[in-house]
């Protein structure tokens, strides 16, 4: 059965073990690895999920589906997730809950200023913590009543998704000789590396971002990132 018919199936009621049962969540996230983490958290919680990797893809989904919850990453390849949050909270009244997401804790203020009802800081792997964040952001009328099971389960995204993210960065570095994508690479790679717990790559991405913001030379930073990314790809292929 096509996914489009899901919209006409009466939603199931939440249970203590699956408190998000009956909800459809649209996840707008360009990282395959981070998106896979949220997908697993949603499915373990009982929610149906739709995924988009850009603002353009998100608008296509919104033209067809009516999600209850939208989880929007702040850094997207074709613009700021804050713009989509503002649009969803002011124009799409059928979206009951909009949650901002970023690996940068400072982005919380940006997401809430745009109208987000909550914020998730990446990485997020604990099932119980994820459920609480979503439920707390929902309007009170949409929250399930009764006791909820305390769940300390953690999820482990497929490492192939992480490989895809590193390959994506390698492709961008190869295809673009100019500087127009370097700011995107820095924020994307920092978020991916935080989710994967790779502190060396996080530090390299943050250094590139700092040097570009300060107007300092950054070619060495780009070369370092290219080397680290290729190393991660090689290590993954060898394992």
Image (spheres, rainbow, N blue to C red):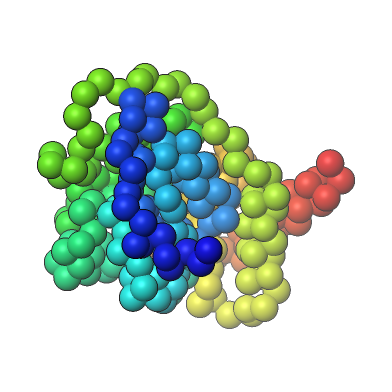
Left or right: 186, with 88 as reference point: right
Left or right: 149, with 225 as reference point: left
Residue drawn at x 49%, y 24% as measured from the top left: 153
Name the foreground residue: 35 vs 24: 24
Residue drawn at x 20%, y 37% as measured from the top left: 143
Q: Is residue 152 visible?
A: yes
Name the foreground residue: 125 vs 150: 150
147 versus 165 height, above or below: above
Work out which quarter of the rendered image holds the C terminus and state it.
top right
Q: Quadrant of residue 6?
A: bottom left
159 versus 214 height, above or below: above
Locate residue 186, reporting x and y percent.
52, 59
Locate residue 219, reporting x and y percent.
62, 66
Locate residue 2, reporting x and y percent.
51, 67
Residue at the outermost right position: 238
Residue drawn at x 48%, y 42% as measured from the top left: 43
Locate residue 36, reporting x and y percent.
55, 48
């Amino acid at each position: 059965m096509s996914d489009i018919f899901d919209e006409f199936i009466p939603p199931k009621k939440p249970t203590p073990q699956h408190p998000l049962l009956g909800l459809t969540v649209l996840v707008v996230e360009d990282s395959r690895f981070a998106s896979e983490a949220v997908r697993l958290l949603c499915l373990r919680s009982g929610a149906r999920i739709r995924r988009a990797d850009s603002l353009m893809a998100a608008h296509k989904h919104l033209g067809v589906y009516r999600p209850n919850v939208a989880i929007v990453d702040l850094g997207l390849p074709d613009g700021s997730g804050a713009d989509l949050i503002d649009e969803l909270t002011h124009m799409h009244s059928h979206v009951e809950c909009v949650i901002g997401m970023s690996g940068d804790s400072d982005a919380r203020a940006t997401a809430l200023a745009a109208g987000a009802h909550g914020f998730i800081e990446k990485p997020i792997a604990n099932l119980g913590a994820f459920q609480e964040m979503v439920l707390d952001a929902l309007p009170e009328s949409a929250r399930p009543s009764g006791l909820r099971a305390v769940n300390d389960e953690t999820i482990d995204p497929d490492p192939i998704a992480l490989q895809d993210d590193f390959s994506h960065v390698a492709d961008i570095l190869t295809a673009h000789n100019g500087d127009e994508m370097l700011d995107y690479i820095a924020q994307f790679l920092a978020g991916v590396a935080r989710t994967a717990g790779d502190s060396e790559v996080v530090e390299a991405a943050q250094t590139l971002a700092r040097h570009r913001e300060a107007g300092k030379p950054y070619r060495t930073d780009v070369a370092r990132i290219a080397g680290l990314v290729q190393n991660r790809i090689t290590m993954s292929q060898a394992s």
